Image (spheres, coloured by chain):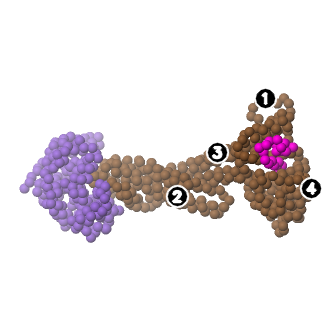
Chain colours: A brown, B purple
Amino acid sequence: MRGVDLIGFAAGGLRGHRLRTILSLLGVSIGVASVLLLTSLGEGARLYVTGEFASLGANLLIVIPGKTETAGLAPLVNTAPHDLTLEDADALLQRVPAIERVAPIVVGTARASAGDRSREITLLGTTHDVLEIRHLRMASGRFLPREQPRAAVCVLGAGAARELFPQENPLGRWVRIGDWRFRVIGIMAPRGTSIGMDMDQVIEIPVETALRVFNRSGLFRILAEAGSHRDLNRTQEEMRRILRERHAGQEDVTIITQDAVLSSFNLILRALTAALAGIAAISLGVAGLGIMNVMLVSVSERAREIGLLKAIGTTHAQVISVFLVEAAVLSTAGGVVGLIVGLAAGHGLQRLYPDFPIHCPPWVIGAALAVATSVGLLFGILPARRAAQLNPIEALMRRKA
Amino acid sequence: MIRLDAIERTYVVGGSPVRALKETTLEIQPGEYVSIMGPSGSGKSTLLHILGCLDRPNGGSYRFAGQETARFSDDELSSLRRHRIGFVFQFFHLVPRLTAAANVELPMVFAGIPPDQRRQRVEQVLEVVGLGHRAGHRPDQLSGGEQQRVAIARAVVMEPAVLLADEPTGNLDSGSGREIVELMERMNRQGLTLIVVTHDPKIGDRARRRIRLADGRVISDDSP
């Protein structure tokens, strides 16, 4: 029997009971569409997060005060961590040859006001080099000056500028933060959320000023950028050594590399995508049961036809393949519909929410179709065997289904 | 052509065995026109199913064209039905969703014959049964007599050696019943071996050779 004829005959069988065919086809469509959408969402989230990290620079090392101890005796001496200071940051820049830039970071919230407008805002104390390290761009004016780390100047995030100065150009104006007044010298280009911090809603001020505003001596973080991606581990070791030296021999800082964070996020989000796809795959399994049900009904309804096929010399294997192909045609058609629906839904979501990360990797399309077809074949086995095992004499003697 | 030797067929009905055929011995030559008659339960349907290789006997020997069918695998029996045996049934058994032409074509589709060859042959056979103009109609658009003609066309499309008809007129009025029988008789005159199972003497008595069954045995076998 020719393959084309087999598919033609099987498709003809499906046309015999349209409503049932369409319903079970819909089942597969929903399954495939949800696998596609959820995978796209998971994959979109992964690419979004890894993209965010990559945009921070792959050569980034982050120094965090404090050290997580997982084991050990209660300390006999006072081991309260030393503050991470501006001098530490300078030392890293001076003494580790691989490090090209550092940016000390101080973060806190404060009430900022301009004229009669006022709001709670995140204050970011830092230095000029953060511009390069975090790949930030200016909309107008200039960034924090390289010298004068105590100047009373500030740079507004795009959102903060809009809200504090809705009508006028903020450049040269004053912003009041607590008891301090700052002159606006620059405005950032819109950036959006970057690793949990909405960079548009931030006001940047010189780091020493920030320490005074918050009355702190310790930094929140030190960002350090190495010149090359290679030897990041050795650079990290050197940094650790220098800081230990400066902190009276205590290892009281944590240094993380962008790479480590990136790969663990990558891992987590891959697992998330797989879990989402797995959940959606359950609906494909249910759809498979639907197909099996339809095919079983079809087999018993078409007992006379099967009896006839046997009488005209159709072999056992041919009867099986007729019904298997019928189930596969059904589920593949459902898969195609599901693909179209899923892709369209993804596209629609993307249009409605342009910021929403959706990414459908091309292999998912092929995989979804292959899975849909296999679902049909798998759940078609039982009905097809039942058809082939039908006793032709009994089947022919049934008057009407 | 066909040689049955002491064929036994026993069914188990409700736990107790029923002997549908008892030591049936029969020989049919190529080109014969045979009717098999008997009351219901006489075993004539069982005999027809065994002749058509839809059923296997429990004992005895069935040789088709000199070959012992008991030694055939299921696929070899399928092949025998496909190429050498045509069936005509009381209830036509046309596939309702297919046109007359597609129904006739069906055996050739499963035999893997290429489409252009199939079309030619279908046209030819539908012409023979006088339905060339109805090729595109579905069974529910055809009368009973026409449906049975389509069924006959389907039965002979593979040019079998034997045509087995099971109560072919049982579902038709007497006029179209006679036409159907005449059609098959015409094919028989061209060399097709024709075996008709019926309980209707008006049909059965037309055959040159009449076999009567009762209680699973041949009780008479006469050629006038």
Provide the residue designation for mark 2.
A338
- Helix, strand or loop at label 3? It is helix
Which comes before the other along the chain, label 2 or label 1? Answer: 1
Residue A42 — which label? Answer: none
Determine contact: label 3, label 1, CB under 8 Å: no
> Residue at horizontal 21%, vertical 55%?
B160
For the C terminus of chain A, give its image quadrant.
Answer: bottom left
Provide the residue designation for mark 4.
A179
- Helix, strand or loop at label 4? It is loop
Q: CA distance from mark 3 to mark 4?
A: 46 Å
Residue A109 included in the magenta stretch of the image: yes
The mark lying in front, picked from 3 and 4, is 3
Residue A73 — which label? Answer: 1
Question: Can you say whether A50 is above or below B8 in the image?
Answer: below
Provide the residue designation for mark 3.
A267
> Residue at horizontal 78%, vertical 45%?
A99
